[in-house]
Image: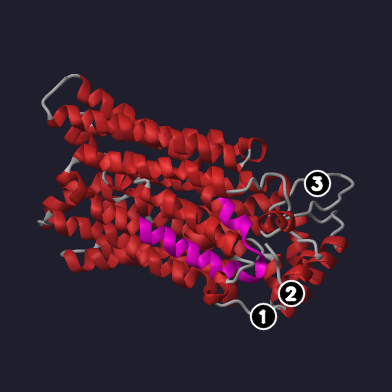
Amino acid sequence: MKMSNASDGSREVREPLVEKHVVESKQEQPWMVYLSTFVAVCGSFAFGSCAGYSSPAQAAIRNDLSLTIAEFSLFGSLLTFGAMFGAITSGPIADSIGRKGAMRVSSAFCVAGWLAIFFAKGVVALDLGRLATGYGMGAFSYVVPIFIAEIAPKAFRGALTTLNQILICTGVSVSFIIGTMVTWRVLALIGLIPCAVSFLGLFCIPESPRWLAKMGRDTEFEAALRKLRGKKADVSEEAAEIQDYIETLQRLPKAKALDLFQRRYIRSVLIAFGLMVFQQFGGINGICFYTSSIFEQAGFPTRLGMTIYAILQVVITALNAPIVDRAGRKPLLLVSATGLVIGCLITAVSFYLKAHDMAHEAVPVLAVVGILMYIASFSAGMGAMPWVVMSEIFPINIKGVAGGMATLVNWFGAWAVSYTFNFLMSWSSYGTFIIYAVVNALAIVFVIAVVPETKGKTLEEIQAVVNP
């Protein structure tokens, strides 16, 4: 694929900050990078708390506020609808007021949403609160992996970016487990904790040096870079590279949404958007939001099933983090998608047997094995890798627009799946999981045919592979 002259020129400039280790004589540990990552992924935990809320709270909310299944389905799906608006605005917000500023906005929306849910006396306040937490989720889902990718050395960029998914899973799991022990209003209050930690922690960490350089704030840029790399680190070469790269970017035209469909960007768009589509339409948010309902319909003890589910997804995602930069993104995606197909088919068999009044004792066992296989497989790759690849695949001059649009695609899929899940299950429980199995099978084909391996490559090298 031929690139334009401007694009060719940008390839001559080495990507700084994310790509290159600072040469240090004493190999000082980047403790500020770790602290900054921790603060950022508190937003990921808040994301998970929002996503995991509806499953343990479903029965109690419906009983206390007398909601119909349609009203609760709307409540559940409004989270992802709000996240779509968060996705649309997160890129421009992160580019205009900074990565830290965008995370503060996300935290504020989540706090407002949780308070609205806690004080809700009827469906309107409940839905408005869900919409607000959804907005915060959507913004967090874009800005957290971008911020981490911009501050992390390339040797463990993948592992640190994967922490985003680990903390999302942890947030979901904590909501699942605590939600079986406390009321839905108390669970909403607990959701405030990671938002507060994130908001306050942002005062203790530096802004992304790359964003500061892009905004021309040179003094703050050098101070942030030195704070991230350590007092004894020689940052002069890295700082010069960043400035050189930013100057080249500023000569390029400002990106707009329509620019994503230019020939030089189309493969990056296809890869990122395609992974987001397959991640969501494979069924994850329907299964995550209504796990308790699935176990209940299959005849498996709900509390036990949700506890196992919660623990398993955190363990698998955590075990996966150290191997991201060794095994590579593409193999993990393929293994994950294959496991998703198998998990969906096992669950489909369970519900088929139940629908035809066959093998009664096998039904709950097959259902829980299928669901656990599904969530373990999702946590092993398809959960984190699309976000890792998205943070790597776009050049910096379109990253704000492209990342926001990719996140919008992701959340539209999440909304569609979460809203239709209950209706699909009413139509055909085993048919629902067969549909998800087919989508995940198509994901395998997509990853093999389209997605490149980005392991161990600088962002410039990735651009050369994607747009040769």
Residue beneath disc 1: 253
Near-viewer residue (248 or 102): 248
Give residue 97's quadrant in the image: bottom right
Residue beneath disc 2: 6
Picture coordinates of residue 143 (x, y %)? 54, 62
Q: Give the position of the N terminus as an image quadrant.
A: bottom right
Residue beneath disc 3: 28
Point 27% across, 68% down: residue = 128
Point 45% across, 45% down: residue = 443
* Marks 2 and 3, the one that precedes in the sequence: 2
Point 74% across, 80% down: residue = 251
Q: Are marks 1 and 3 in contact (CB under 8 Å)?
A: no
Q: Residues within 10 Å of mark 2 (few under 14, many from 20)?
A: few
**Which region shows up in magenta?**
388-413
Distance in Å between CA atoms under marks 1 and 3 = 38 Å
Q: Give the position of the C terminus as an image quadrant.
A: bottom right
Q: Main secondary structure of the magenta part?
A: helix
User: Which tag is nearer the camera, tag 1 or tag 3?
Assistant: 1
Badge 3 amino acid: Glu
* Marks 1 and 2, the one that precedes in the sequence: 2
